[in-house]
Image: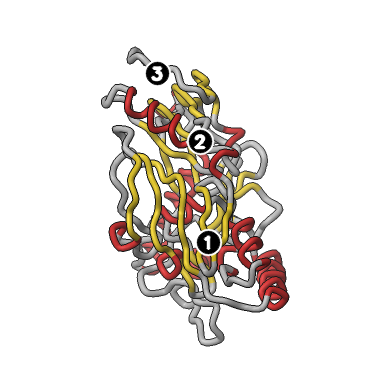
């Protein structure tokens, strides 16, 4: 990259491989990986950065495939300065890098119900971007507003309504980096909330490949068939059921595999490349469309350039 890069107070590393930073353990290098010291550092860096240089805000890599050729531009990864959790009455304020599970536990300690976050992998910033949800509750149901830094370095507040949250969807200005989140949570008994989360973890571990390298659910459920966790929840048109019906449970491509335990989980069995994972996902999409007429949409975010062997 030929553009001049500002010198921040935080960490800035050139040509940093990203495979160790994603749950799937794949991906080429970023031109630059920036971990800001604090919000002011982030704002100053973005204000000084050439507007032509693309930026990508990366969470903990739980829902991400970085392609083998890596990412051109600057990848921004928030660290400890952005993982605090504060509680005031029924309002929970969390830094964008705080883990969903951490926020759920801290809220439960204070008698506030954000239990739906307990089994969702990733960070709160990512949960907002994807309008993450589980057991019938979504970020849209609890979100008040977010603090963010725009691509030109302004610190702004966006109300939940401005994000136009929908199923696994939000609308944010291009290059905008969420730094903090405010949520309003219903009250509950701390012991009961912790017990509910323990049940949720047991249910998740019984049905999902939590010990494998995965990125959570690979494909979105078809429109109108998201998980509610209720007794009358229908499974006929869930993504996992469509994949199963197409005979692709356990199907492999190179080092990639659709999990035997839960066929909507794409896993790295040990030697997968990003190309393997994406190719298997596209095969699944084609087969499901042929078998059922439903076109599955990726839930896992895919970003970056193909590797040299794919060019």
Relative to 54, is 126 above or below? below
Judging depth in this view, the residue of 189 and 1 nearest the camera is: 189
Tell me which colouring the rendered structure shows: secondary structure
Element at label 1 = strand
Left or right: residue 271 versus residue 63 is right
Residue 229 vertical position relative to residue 20 in the rendered view, above or below:
below
Which of the two labelled residues, at mark 1 and mark 2, occupies the earlier sequence position? Answer: 2
Q: Is residue 152 left or right of residue 285?
A: left
Residue 48 in picture, x, y percent from top left: 33, 23
* Mark 2 Cα-neighbour bin, 10 Å: few <14, some 14–19, many ≥20: many
Relative horizontal placement of residue 278, taking residue 189 as reference (left or right)? left
Q: CA distance from mark 1 to mark 3?
A: 34 Å
Residue 242 seen in the figure:
no
Q: Quadrant of residue 31?
A: top left
Q: Which residue is mark 1?
A: 92
- Mark nearer the viewer, 1 or 3: 1
Q: Secondary structure at mark 2?
A: strand
In this rendering, which labeled residue sits more in front, label 2 or label 3? 3
Between 294 and 204, which is closer to the camera in this rendering? 204
Q: Residue at x 61, y 33 (%)?
A: 20
Q: Which residue, given by chain and number where applicable, does mark 3 sit on?
A: 6
> How far, Cα to Cα, is label 2 from label 3?
16 Å
């Amino acid at each position: 990259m030929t553009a001049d890069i500002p010198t921040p107070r935080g960490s800035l590393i050139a040509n940093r491989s990203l495979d160790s930073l994603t749950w799937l353990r794949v991906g080429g290098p970023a031109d630059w990986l920036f971990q800001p010291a604090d919000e002011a550092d982030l704002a100053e860096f973005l204000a000084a950065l050439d507007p032509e240089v693309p930026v990508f805000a990366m969470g903990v890599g739980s829902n991400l495939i970085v392609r083998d050729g890596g990412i051109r531009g600057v990848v921004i990864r928030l660290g400890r300065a952005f993982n605090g959790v504060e509680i005031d009455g029924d309002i929970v304020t969390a830094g964008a890098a705080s883990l969903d599970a951490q926020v759920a536990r801290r809220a439960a300690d204070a008698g506030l119900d954000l239990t739906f976050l307990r089994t969702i992998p990733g960070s709160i910033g990512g949960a907002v971007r994807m309008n993450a949800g589980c057991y019938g509750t979504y970020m849209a149901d609890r979100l008040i507003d977010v603090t963010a830094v725009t691509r030109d370095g302004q610190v702004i507040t966006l109300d939940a309504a401005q994000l136009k949250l929908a199923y696994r969807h939000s609308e944010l200005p291009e290059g905008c980096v969420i730094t903090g989140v405010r949520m309003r949570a219903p009250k509950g008994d701390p012991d009961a909330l912790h017990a509910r989360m323990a049940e949720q973890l047991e249910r998740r571990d019984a049905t999902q490949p939590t010990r494998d390298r995965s990125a959570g659910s690979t494909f979105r459920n078809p429109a109108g068939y998201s998980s509610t966790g209720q007794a009358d929840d229908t499974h006929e048109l869930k993504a996992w059921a469509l994949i199963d019906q197409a005979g692709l449970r356990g199907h492999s491509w190179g080092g990639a595999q659709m999990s035997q335990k839960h066929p909507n989980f794409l896993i790295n069995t040990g030697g997968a490349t990003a190309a393997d994972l994406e190719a298997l996902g596209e095969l699944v999409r084609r087969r499901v469309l042929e078998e059922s007429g439903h076109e599955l949409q990726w839930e896992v975010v895919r970003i970056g350039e193909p590797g040299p062997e794919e060019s």
